[in-house]
Amino acid sequence: MALLEVNDLHTSFATDDGIVRAVEGVSFTVEKGQTLGIVGESGCGKSVTCLTIMGLNPKRNTITSGEALWKGKNLLTAKPRALREIRGAEISMIFQDPMTSLNPVHTIGKQLIEAVQLHRDVTTRAARARARELLKAVGIPRADARMDDYPHQFSGGMRQRVMIAMALINDPDLLIADEPTTALDVTTQAQILTLMKRLQEEFGSAIMMITHDLGVVAEVADDVLVMYAANVVEQADVDDLFNRPQHPYTWGLMGSLPRLEADLERLTQIPGQPPSLLRPPAGCRFHPRCPHVMEVCKTTVPPLAPSERDAAHLQACHLDQETKDREAAKLIEATMAEAR
Amino acid sequence: MWRYLVRRILWAGVLMLGVTLVTFVLFYLAPESPERAVCGGVGGNAAVPSCMRQATKKLGLDHPVYYQYGLFLKRLIIDRSLGTSFITKQPVNHVIGRAARVTASLVFGGAILWLTLGLLVGILSALRPRSLLDRAGMVFVLIGVSAHPVWIGLIFSYFFGYKLRNFPIHTPIAGYAPILNPAPGQPGGVVQWAYHLILPWCTFAILFAALYARMIRANVLETLNEDFVRTARAKGAPEGRVMRSHVLRNALLPVVTMLGMDIGLALGGAIFTETVYTLPGLGRTAILAIGSYDLTVVQGVVIFATLSIIVFNLIVDVLYAWVDPRIRLT
């Protein structure tokens, strides 16, 4: 049995302007000890997918359907109490902005100890020892003394380490990381990613890594989900995705990565903006921005289906296989040329 | 920390000098002479010339103003005396002491009431935004912010005091019953004290309760959206714990500041409430003293009010550094 199996997940928010369909029909599985990367632009529904699984969306205006089976049990219909026992113990989460994710009026130690004692009936002394152990594991120097410091006494990278320590403190089976490196500077990003990879080996947790950075995905993920405007447009294992990308949106993402070619004045970009989820375009949602748009794209939604070459490689595009292979090859060629 | 306190206290001394000097000069400039006031010459009455000559000499009015101010300071610092009332001839220290007790009873009781009410309405409204409860709470806030204490006082007096006769409104001792040592034949003791103050407390607290409810609601709503609240939920904390340990602890930080400053300010005299219920507090004392040109009493009220504001601001600063670890006093 898969650790987490998400089937046809839908999440909508009732707002003053109407219903925002933030996630529509997302399905995936996460296996024990594996890393799933979810990529897409801001507002494509990647964070909402995770918050839905965790049950952290605002209850008042959220409508959810589908299922998220955690070890066979549906999290979406679980009682608040049962969900609470899973959160932080079996599934834990790291957020994007470490500067605001820790409570400013409690010491780091207190917040770590709280995380332990919410799920384990241990003495404060034992919880403190556990907290110290984790702070050491995430590489915080003088862990013992720093337990009594407040979040504002830590730098951004150090706070994200504290968040990681807090997430791993109860040995979770799954760690959801929602853009954990976005708010950090580049050198710190690399440190945090290396740390997460090392800790994954040490603790054996599965990871869901949400990011808009394909570089991060290439580095850590085993499987990748590419999302666009609340839909999954491509799903494959990481090598497949980078060697034979099948969707124009994925090509756009890869094409817009910064390169070291000196003669390029501007970065390549995908023209236009992601559509509003209040009134998404008809047909394929990417068609207004797609350089390969055809008549059929404007009317018919392409289903997420196995590609002709590989049954495990899912994609949602009307283009014929030949064009896709050609475009993918062109993209790889350009990347290789740069590497040489 | 200690350096900070010493610096603040020194500044308080400078401020005190400035405030008393301004009061002194204002009275000197006013088109009424102290010796006439002393001899009952306020309001067109004739004052006896011999009395005025005597008063001029006794009060040192024949000296220039800076010399008089020096005398005032010397008396204040060396004898710790605010002087004698021009009109009643009582020591001002006693006048202020008596009035301060009334005002303090009103302000502290009122503060407990407004804080309780503000917290209750604010938190409940924030927990269920747009609900019926929230709307009712915000209607209360609107009324509380708009209604003037004098008007509320009159309405309360009319209904509870006159129509229903539940509460005393004009007892012989002007609406106040001290806890200790009441005048012979007058009400006294804790029960009478509280009974006489219930209407003033309510009147005084409504405006503040409304302001606090509105602020607490906004703060709680804002804090509920903070990332660290989501972190707490992601850790598996139950809602009650999230609310207490993470939301309220942060949302109520500004209340500490506001409460301290409001109490400090109100201790200088809750003029409207004291006037409408004829409570012999500092505000009413000041109004009466100004009307009868009683410089020493006005000066006494000003000094007490300034002192209470300074002291409560200092308390707020120290308390804030203690409840919010991000603040350091330097």
Image: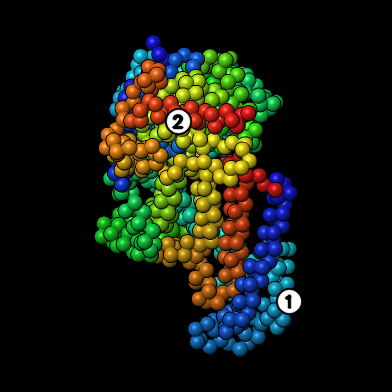
| Mark 1 vs mark 2: in front | 2
Which element is circle 2 on? helix
Type of amino acid under label 1: Tyr
Residue B180: x, y in percent?
50, 52
Is residue B172 among what the camera can see? no
Query: Counting other residues with Cα less than 10 Å from the Cα at mark 2, is it few (<14), some (14-19), or many (20 or more)?
Result: some
Quarter holding the C terminus of chain A is: top right
Q: Tell me how far mark 1 sits from mark 2, CA to CA.
A: 96 Å
**The quarter of the displayed image where residue B133 is located:** top left
Q: Which residue is under mark 2?
A: A327
Q: Position of residue B141 (x, y in %)?
A: 36, 54
User: Relative to residue A287, is residue A49 depicted above or below?
Assistant: above
Three-letter code, disc 2? Glu
Chain name for mark 1 = B
What label sits on residue B67 in the rendered view? 1
Q: Please tell me in which quadrant of the rendered image residue A104 appears.
A: top right
